[in-house]
Image (spheres, grey):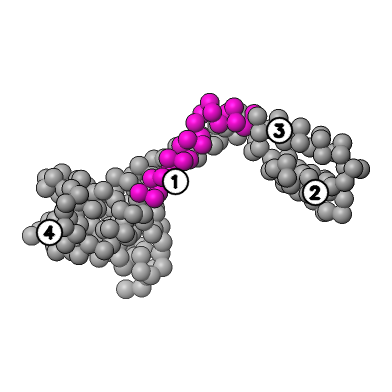
């Protein structure tokens, strides 16, 4: 069967349903076994530890996704409130188009000399006003705080994923957990059609089916 044929048998909505079903299966396992939070003294090769590591990764992944969507929404709100990003466009002689400026140091570089003193002052005043509006909106909506939290959670997710990859699998469920994490991490949205993603999704479906029949 060709890749295009594989894709026809697994339309986008079906691919997402497959991953949702896998998530539900693994979540039920971790809830049942109490593996949702690995203890600090657990050996990395202990049976069942992969599921605990998957749950730690998945919780971080879900929280990171939530924060990503939130910071995107908040950025839109800040942009509306501030009237744009805290930058100005400088018309520089000899340049075909305006140059986007973000700092006073850039203004000093682009408008050097005594002859440009008034232009520098005007540009810095405009930039300061834009920064003030941006900072006020940022504080109101909490955009920077959310973005920082997202960055921190991304680090937690990456560290959790590394532990998951390195932990030896002992059961089919452990393998399901690892493949699920790979697909969710590397193919967000499950839309990739080229190898090996369709094949990995089909293998994941097979493994879950076999485990449920066992």
State the image quarter where residue 210 is shown: bottom left
Q: Earlier in the sequence, mark 1 or mark 3?
A: 3
* Residue linked to disc 2: 110
Question: Which of these two is toward me, 95 or 103?
Answer: 103
Q: Earlier in the sequence, mark 4 or mark 1?
A: 4
Secondary structure of the residue carrying numbered label 1: helix
* Residue linked to disc 3: 128
Task: Give neighbour class at mark 2: few <14, some 14-19, many 20+ (Cα, 10 Å).
Answer: some
Residue 212: numbered disc: none
What residue sits 35% from the left and 50% below the top? 157
Asked if the residue at tag 2 contacts the one at tag 4, i.e. Cβ–Cβ closer than 8 Å, the answer is no
Q: Earlier in the sequence, mark 3 or mark 2?
A: 2
| Numbered range of the magenta stretch | 133-156
* Residue linked to disc 4: 47
**Distance Cα–Cα, label 3 vs label 2:** 17 Å
Q: Quadrant of the N terminus?
A: bottom left
Secondary structure of the residue carrying numbered label 4: loop
* Residue linked to disc 1: 151
């Amino acid at each position: 069967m060709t890749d295009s044929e594989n894709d026809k048998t697994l339309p986008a909505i079906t691919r997402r349903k497959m991953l949702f079903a896998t998530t539900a299966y693994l979540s039920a396992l971790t809830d049942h076994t109490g593996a949702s939070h690995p203890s600090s003294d657990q050996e990395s090769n202990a049976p069942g530890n992969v599921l605990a590591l998957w749950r730690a990764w998945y919780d971080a992944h879900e929280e990171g996704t939530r924060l990503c969507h939130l910071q995107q929404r908040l950025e839109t709100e800040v942009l509306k409130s501030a009237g744009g990003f805290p930058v100005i466009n400088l018309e520089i002689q000899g340049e075909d188009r305006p140059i986007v400026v973000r700092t006073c140091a850039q203004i000093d570089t682009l408008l050097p000399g005594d002859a440009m003193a008034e232009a520098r002052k005007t540009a810095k005043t405009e930039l300061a006003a834009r920064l003030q509006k941006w900072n006020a909106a940022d504080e109101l909506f909490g955009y920077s705080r959310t973005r920082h939290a997202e960055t921190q959670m991304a680090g937690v997710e990456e560290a959790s994923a590394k532990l998951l990859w390195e932990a030896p699998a002992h059961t089919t469920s452990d393998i399901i957990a690892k493949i699920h994490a790979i697909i969710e991490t590397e193919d967000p949205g499950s839309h990739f059609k080229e190898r090996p993603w369709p094949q990995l999704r089909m293998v994941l479906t097979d493994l879950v089916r076999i485990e449920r029949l066992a």
